[in-house]
Image (cartoon, rainbow, N blue to C red):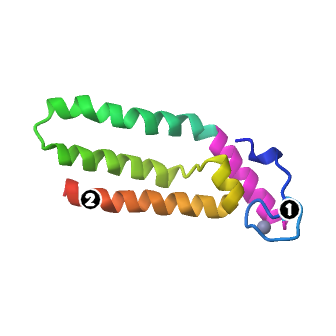
Amino acid sequence: MGIESIISKECKWCNAKNTINFCSDECREKFYSFAAFARKYIKLFIILIIVCPFAFIPISAFIDHDSLFFFGAMFLFLGVTITALSFCTTQTVELLGLRRSIIAGRICGIVMIVISLPFIL
Ligand SMILES: [Zn+2]
């Protein structure tokens, strides 16, 4: 993530105005701990997001279920991944601030999980 190097006139974590980069030590700490978490798991996240749709297609050929079930299972898997690893694009983080981008990512993930459930259950 390149967002650490961007100088911001708002708090990079909570978007408080009239501050340079961070409004408090707490926000600075939360920002950098999430940045470290993101650095550690970003590759896994990308692999899961890309591999998952491709993995479910061949699996579905071997298991006797209708295709809607696999659509649901794929959606569930993506939803869980996005909820656990809520990494948004740099543009989204710049726009919303990191804290709100994480919340937005979690909401998307949870919505995907909810949508997937009727197909699986
Ligand atoms: Zn702040």
Label 1 sits on a secondary structure element that is loop
Mark 2 = which residue?
117
Q: Is residue 43 magenta?
A: no
Residue 39 in the figure: left or right of residue 51: right
Q: Nearer the observer, disc 1 or disc 2? A: 1
Q: Is residue 36 magenta?
A: yes
Residue at 28 percent across and 35 percent down: it is 56
Mark 1 = which residue?
9
Which of marks 2 and 1 precedes in the sequence? 1
Q: Main secondary structure of the magenta part?
A: helix
The foreground one among 22 and 17 is 17
Residue at 71 percent across and 51 percent down: it is 33
Q: Tell me the kind of residue under disc 2.
A: Leu
Read off the magenta span. 23-39
Graded by Cα atoms within 10 Å as few (under 14), some (14 to 19) or many (20 or more), the crowding at tag 2 reads some
Q: Quadrant of the C terminus?
A: bottom left
Name the residue furthest left: 64
Residue at 52 percent across and 36 percent down: it is 46
CA distance separating discs 1 and 2 = 42 Å
Question: In the picture shown, does residue 97 fall above or below 50?
Answer: below
Residue 28 occupies which quadrant of the picture? bottom right
